[in-house]
Each structure stands twice: as C-alpha cells, then as structure tokens.
Amino acid sequence: MVVGDFAEEVDTLIIGSGPGGYVAAIRAAQLGQKVTIVEKGDVGGVCLNVGCIPSKALIQAGHRYHEAKSGGDEMGITAEKVNVDFSKVQEWKAGVVKKLTGGVQGLLKGNNVNIVQGEAYFSDENSVKVSMDEYNSQTYKFKNCIVATGSRPIELPNFKYSKRVINSTGALSLDEIPEKLVVIGGGYIGIELAGAYSNLGSEVTVLEGEKRILGGFEKQMAQLVQRRLKKNGVKFETQAFAQSVEETDNGVTIKAEVKGKEKSYDADYVLVSVGRKPNTDELGLEQIGVELDEKGFIKVDKQCRTSNKSIYAIGDIIEGPQLAHKASYEGKIAAEAISGEASEIDYLGIPMVVFAEPELASVGYTESEAKEAGYDAVGAKFPFQANGRALSLNDSEGFMKLVTRKEDGLVIGAQIAGPNASDMIAEAGLAIEAGMTAEDLAMTIHAHPTLGEITMETAEVALGTPIHITK
C-alpha cells in the first residue's frame, strides 16, 4: 500500500540540499515563497558531506602534520616523535562536517523550509513523487521547481569502484593512510588529494593524460604546484593513460600507457579523479519537456530557467565550472527570478580555487583569454617574495597577476599563486564586479604587513609606479 496519495501543494519545490539547493531554499523563503526541499541523502549535499568541506579538513590535517615534522627547520624549530592518529583525524573531520550540516538544517528550519527525506521523480510538469522508502511516497504539486541534484564522480570502464579502486568520496573516508597511492587525473580534485596524502606520508604517483596538470590554470601557476609536490616526493606521469587494474586483498596493480610505452604501478589504492557527471538521469526530466545536452547537462537561460518554464536548474547539472559557490550564486538567481525579479547570471566574477601548495586562485579573464575576447589587455605581476608578510610566514613562493584593459586600467581578471590565495582573490573579484580600475586598488590603503598588500602592489605595477620592485 502506498501512503500519501493526496498531493501537497507548495510554491517552490527544490530537489537537492547542497550549496545550490539549500541557498535557493532560504532565498526563496526570504522572498515569501512556501518552500519544500527534498534530499535523498544527507542535508548539505556532496560539498558539505563528502566534498569541499571534508577535503579541506583533510588537507589542513596534512599541512599540520607535515609542518610539525619538517616545516620549522629553517626557523630553528624542530620536533621529535611527531605522529598522526588517522582515526582521530577522521573523527575530527566528521565533527567539522556535523557542525556545518547541523547548521544548514537549523537555517532551513529557521526560514520555515520544509525538509523531506526521499528520492524525487517528476510525475508531470507540475508535480513530483517523493519515495521515502519501498512502501511510502508523497506527491508534491508545485508552482515552480528548482533542480539542484549535483554531480557524481565519473567511473572509468576498466576501473570499477571497489574497496581499492576509489573515487574522491572513498579517498576521504579511508581508515588508513596508504603507503602508496596512485591518482588518475591531475585536475584540482586529484591534485588536492594527492597533496593531502603526500603530506600525511603516502608515496603518491599522479597519472595525467594531458601534457601538464591543472589545465584550467595558467602554466606557470601549475608549475609552481607541481614543483612543490615533487619536492614532497610526489611523482608525475603526463600523457599517461590508465588501461587496467588488478586488485588483490592488499592492493592494486595499475597498467598505463605513458608516452606510448606500457608501465605498471603497485599501490594500496588507486584514486580515480577524472571529472564528474551531472545527476540528471533518474529524475524523469525528458518526459516533462526539460531539454538536456549530449552530456546530460540541463539547458537553461540567463535566469536558470529550463525549457519547461516552471522548472529551473542550478549547480553542477548545468553548463559551467562545477563549483559550490557557483551553485549558491545560481540558487539565489533562480529564487529571485521565480519571485519576478530581474536577476540574471553573470559568471565573470566567479573565482576558481585549488587548495594545493601553493594555493591557486583565478577570477575573470587571464591575459590570453582577454586578448582572445578582443580586449587590448595587459598583465601586471608582483612576486610574493617582495612581501614582508609572506617572508615572515616562510612561504614566499608565488605571485599575483592583474589583468587590466589598456585604455583605462579597468580590472578584468586576476590570478594568484601563493599562501591564502583563496582568500585574497575576493578583492580582485569585487574589483571586477564593481567596475574598478587598477588605480582604485592602488589607492586603497592596505594594512601592513599583510598578504593583502600584494593586491595593492600589483595594481601599482599595472600603473607603472611600483614601490617594492624595480621596473
């Protein structure tokens, strides 16, 4: 017997409670909509539970351990018998996740958003059936729906996920630090986890199919990361294509074609990190007139509206970089569009960050992208080595690059490689969004000594008036 045959009516139904879904739900509720959010897994989605947050916690634990072992030698600070209790690391990481996901649930309830646990499937253009379990389901009739179901790791045909063939979720929930780890894929997820486990003591090998790692970032930025990882013992094989894996109870043997030659690698685990695919295949979207592209991404307009005018889509399931903050941004746009506001998406100011060593961050155009887009653009660069705060941190490798329009100095892009790049990039993003010039940044007084001064100094380079480096 099916319980719950009578449809419950809501203004806005949101499918998925990740950084896109829960933000959309809160914004929609603030705008006076009656909102129900449906989640088949854990509230907070992939990002909070098995993605962004736990990965950064693991990265931080790796930093702490590595620094305790060897990070203070140059300062005359050494430590003996530094150990890592990985079970406690995992326990601490789980605690961070619990605090954040609990906070999200509190925010949803505080905004009178109804939370429903279950799996959603579209019954028709304006209703969804939510299956709570094998016997119980509930139909929800909506005026508008926002689909925010996120993505999942791509599984390679010859590398089916198992105990020793793992994806990013599996890599974050290991109960041991691998002695040897092979990472397939040199994108941001693979590089972040390679760095984390390398810092924790694993012998890591990265197999990347392209000629270099981190293809989404400028070559010089990626080289800084690769050099630092190599110094920490990470091995890299580029133009390497994983072919097969043999698994035993104790480990794996991976065979790969590297620059035309066959090689094999033994490891405790192999992490497959070759991208993510949108979760759009089990919702019944096609039967309600929602158009998808050939890769399964939902097609949307500038307000995140699909080909079905009452249904919106945000986050990893639509075109663009699969980033949590992009999903949150789109969630606000969709909620506001439903309320009749003129909000539209504009991706120029969305930053990309890699929590590697050093951190990488980019926003707006790179110099080459700007020129390809038709701008008469110039790039100005300032090194972290010329910054007092970076020197005092004993972490002065890296640079900031500011991309400006030659005719008037308008800031149209920025790239940062160095400590705290993930935080520093926000000022450059604000400059782009606000239509600021290099002069505006140069004339803004920055506290000393701080890494933030690097933004001011880079702007001075763009103006041709640098103080702390020679022309």
Image (cartoon, rainbow, N blue to C red):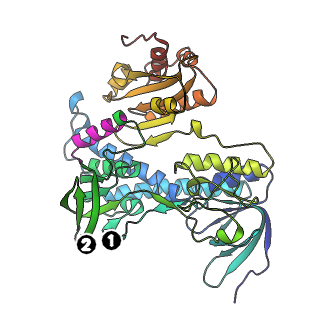
For residue 232: magenta?
Answer: yes
Q: In this picture, which residue range is highlighted in magenta?
A: 221-235
Q: Secondary structure at mark 1?
A: loop
The x, y position of residue 22, in whole percent, is 64, 55
Residue 407, by quadrant, is top right
Q: Which mark is residue 247?
A: 2
The 10 Å Cα crowd at callout 1, few under 14, some 14 to 19, many 20 or more, is some
| SS category of the residue bearing label 2 | strand
Residue 76 seen in the figure = no
| In this view, the mark in front (2 or 1) | 2
Give the vertical position of 42 relative to 62 (above or below).
Answer: below
In the image: residue 9, left or right of residue 145: right
Residue 296 at x, y = what percent?
55, 62
The stretch drawn in magenta includes residue 424: no
Q: Residue at x 63, y 54 (%)?
A: 314
- Amino acid type, label 1: Lys
Q: Is residue 369 visible?
A: yes
* Residue 178 in picture, x, y percent from top left: 26, 60
Mark 2 or mark 1: whose residue is earlier in sequence: 1
Q: How far is the residue under mark 2 from the one under mark 1? A: 9 Å
Quadrant placement of the N terminus = bottom right
Q: Residue furthest bottom?
A: 1
Q: Quarter of the image holding residue 360?
A: top left
Q: Mostly what secondary structure, the magenta segment?
A: helix
Q: Amino acid at mark 2?
A: Glu
Rendered view: 231 above or below 190: above
The residue that appears at 39% across and 12% down in the rendered structure is: 468
Q: Would you say the residues marked 2 and 1 are in contact, meaning their CB atoms lie under 8 Å apart?
A: yes
The image's mark for residue 163 is 1
- Return the residue nearer the eye: 262 or 49: 262
